[in-house]
Amino acid sequence: MDRYQNIVIGSGEGGKFIAWHLAKSGQKTAVIDRRYIGGSCPNINCLPSKNEVWSAKVASMIHQARKYGFDITAPKIDMTAVRRRKREMVDGLVALHLEKYKASGAMLIMGEARFVGPKTLEVRLNEGGTQTMEAERIFLNIGTRPAIPAVPGLAESKPMSNIDLLEINRLPEHLVVIGGGYVGLEFAQAYRRFGSRVTIIQRDSQLLSGEDADVVAEVHSFLADEGIDTVLSSETRNVKGRSGERVTLEVAGKSRSQTQIIEATDILVATGRIPNTSGIGLDVAEVALDAAGYIRVNDRLQTTAANIWAIGECAGSPQFTHVSYDDYRVIADNLAGGSRSTTGRLIPSVLFTDPPVAHVGLSENDARRQGISYRLAKRPMSATLRTRTIDETRGFAKALIGDDDRILGFTMVGPESGEVMAVVQIAMQANQPYQTLRDSIIAHPTMAEGLTDLFGAVQPKGRVSAA
């Protein structure tokens, strides 16, 4: 029996940081992971996908080279080189993580863990054999995995997840993307830019379910202009064939007359994720789950079992790496005697299409649903002169202003929107009125300069946009 003060199951963002933090303080700490050193973000999710999205951006720029003054004849995509660039980045990130483990003193154990007692784990080691471990405190950072809908023939067709798509070294002739959320849209645009024909099938009546209508319309417009076909309010009823070769999908709309057959070569499933909470003995540890299989936690991320915490997606936290990192900070501060909570966190998001979509705070849909009155300021990206220098004038920025002049929410569809959003987020967290940004002197010509124009368009008090 190997005894530790702390064991972390899963080496994702929050898990690895809590392990490094505790180990540096002199506590005997181990991290157990089945496969990915550093978790999914640097290996198979966030960073690798954005790596390929940027390769697709370069491909798009090359195809538009003439308008920038270059004559490039017959450019050709090399998907083997795209994958190689991505793999080189991942290898560098893994090496960086190993250095951090060594520097912190945390032990990294590659294997699959399951509870055999309340604080006891049996680990089936990747190198062979088993190891039994016991800890005073355990942190669960076990993440989620892609969900495959129960569609006849879909699983048998061996569709790709985002993990699989990042590993192919060929260009799909016709890629069907099932799902119109973040993952589906980022890959749909990227592979269209690489040269694939792309069709998106979305069950809901719009892409990006729940997003404001003007944002969705803008995204739909620029995807359509790039030649991406979108089938809305439709479900995949049946799939025949094998992804990677030839597949036939029966897609049904709201009425029988809207049923259509789509023939393609490849399928990407991007319809959500499932928590990795089954089969690891959480019941033995007396860790309770909710109806969807996520670990039940309080606002301090404590589970129903004493001295066991859950971090990131498996705890139902919003599925962003930056949220998992903040989960680590919540736990670390509380272990040190603080009183930090997950309640009321201001969580930003970025959809890495081109142009990207950034959002923080309330959307218009949120405000209407909650009955919160607001003043709306909205400006086209073309009003920000930086967009004219780079010939990327598409999109808009909008802000919701409360009766007390504080910023309730911000959304931007445009170049560098994630960077610009961070400025607004800091103002919101500092409870600054919108006039702080309106009256700031921001360098010209930058994308952030558009904030002075946006907040200069706020209506006077008394003129309310919604209630």
Image (spheres, grey):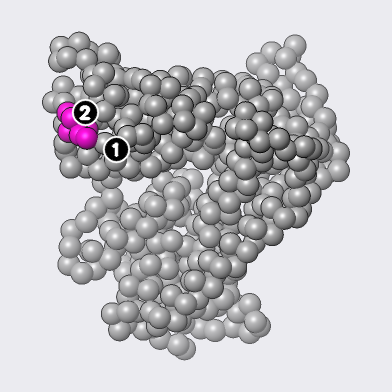
Quarter location, residue 25? bottom left
Q: Which residue is mark 2?
A: 438
- Identify the residue at image location x=47%, y=62%: 12
Camera sees residue 315? no
- Residue type beneath disc 1: Ala
Q: Mark 1: which secondary structure?
A: loop
Which residue is nearer to you in this view: 214 or 194? Answer: 194
Judge left or right: residue 2 versus residue 399: right
Residue 120 spot, x, y in % from top left: 44, 78
Residue 95 among those drawn in magenta: no
Q: Is 111 rendered above or below residue 267?
A: below
Separation of residues labelled 2 and 1 (CA atoms) = 13 Å
State which region is magenta.
435-441
Judge left or right: residue 114 versus residue 238: left
Q: Mark 2: which secondary structure?
A: helix
Q: Which mark is residue 284?
A: none
Residue 196 spot, x, y in % from top left: 75, 36
- Residue type beneath disc 2: Arg
Residue 427 spot, x, y in % from top left: 22, 39
- Identify the residue at image location x=39%, y=55%: 324
> Quick one: quadrant of the C terminus?
top left
- Identify the residue at image location x=15%, y=12%: 462
